Image (cartoon, grey):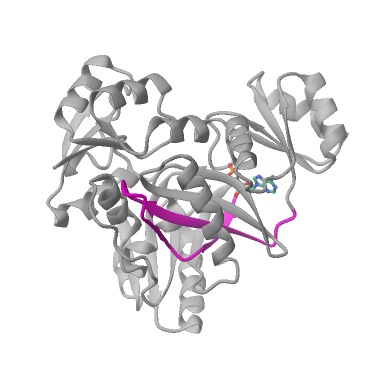
Amino acid sequence: MKIGILGAGQLARMIALAGYPLGLQFVFLDPSAEACANSLGQHLHGAYDDPRLLAELADLADVVTYEFENVPADVADFLASHTQVHPAPKALAVAQDRLIEKAFFRDINIPTAPYAPVNNFADLESAINTIGYPAILKSCTMGYDGKGQSLIKSVDDLAVAWEVLAGAPAVLEGFVPFNREVSIIAARNVAGDIEFYPLSKNTHRGGILRIAKCLDSDALQTQAQHYVTRLLEALDYVGVLALELFDVNGQLVANEFAPRVHNSGHWTIEGAETSQFENHLRAIANLPLGKTHAVGKSAMINFIGGLPVTEELLALPNTHLHLYDKAPRKGRKVAHATIRAETAEQLDSLIEKLAQIADQVDDS
Ligand code: AMP
């Protein structure tokens, strides 16, 4: 079976690496000649909306999936009318626009921060009067890793926050006073079976994920599973999905979801019975899902902007390195390490050590 992937970055690369043992083949569509998954399959080189390449992709692939959510709606629709596409274009349409996404959460009774649409400065002033300070102004589309966002602490920040948007449609969100950020990753197959991974506790800096730690047996696991089940079923979703949540004194509040494999699930490669990448493939290829329970205690540390010394890292116990074959560049995720330890103490001390190494090479 041949899997087509829109995008050939590190997520596509890790999907392909998980697919080879299952006898799957890959074709990628990506505008970059240097995209890091290119060497793992056939590469269609060009724009995501190039009609000739899209027709070729639909022709070559038995099923098409994607590694990013900002796939133009007409591209997803074209592919879906020519071949199987998982997850379906509806999931993209919801995830691409923060306002639509928040309304969708509300409709299926998943709590969100208070929010209001902002299309001009007068909207912003009236929204802040309702929501109050502090609040976050976010562009509705194309925002990720904290991009296109401004924290508004007082009336003095309003004008700058509005300028940052440069007129783009936006949403004002109340600032959620969270205790922790967590995410739940789940896989749903064509038959509607769902497997849930243990929650991941996520630590960000500057809006970018730094550390994800598997939380085995967390008190909020069941609540998160209820929410993600509602989301998967409402979207009739097939594949792996990540739901990012704030923990506010034991009550989960949804931030956003990603209709794809997710950085906070990279620890599953060594830390779960079946990785998120393999389960995404199992789901979209209509194969039985693998079990998702944790194997040992694990965490993932991202390397951003710079690479660790391979020999130094591999000399550490219980540490697994994943290089993405990407040239280091400021703010760019170029590798991650997974730790899989036997005890919580061993895990925490290795997290500390690896976080220090990551900080030394991090230039962001
Ligand atoms: P996002 O791009 O929406 O994932 O936001 C990036 C990061 O900004 C999140 O991981 C949070 O740390 C923070 N953040 C986003 N929205 C809020 C909010 N409404 N309240 C508090 N923190 C937020």
> Image quadrant of residue 335?
bottom left
Residue 293 visible from this viewpoint: yes
Q: Residue at x 30, y 27 (%)?
A: 80
Q: Quadrant of the N terminus?
A: top left
Look at the image and say whether residue 277 sits in the magenta stretch: no
Q: Residue most toward the front? A: 191
| Residue 110, above or below 275 | above
Q: Position of residue 34 (x, y in %)?
A: 26, 35
Left or right of 193: which side holds 246? right
> Image quadrant of residue 296?
bottom left
Q: Where is residue 90 in the image (x, y as percent from the top left)?
A: 44, 31
Residue 309 visible from this viewpoint: no
Given residues 309 and 4, the one toward you in this image is 4
> Image quadrant of residue 50?
top left
> Which residue range is magenta in the image?
177-205
Dominant SS in magenta = strand
Q: Residue at x 33, y 66 (%)?
A: 291
Given residues 296 and 196, the one toward you in this image is 196
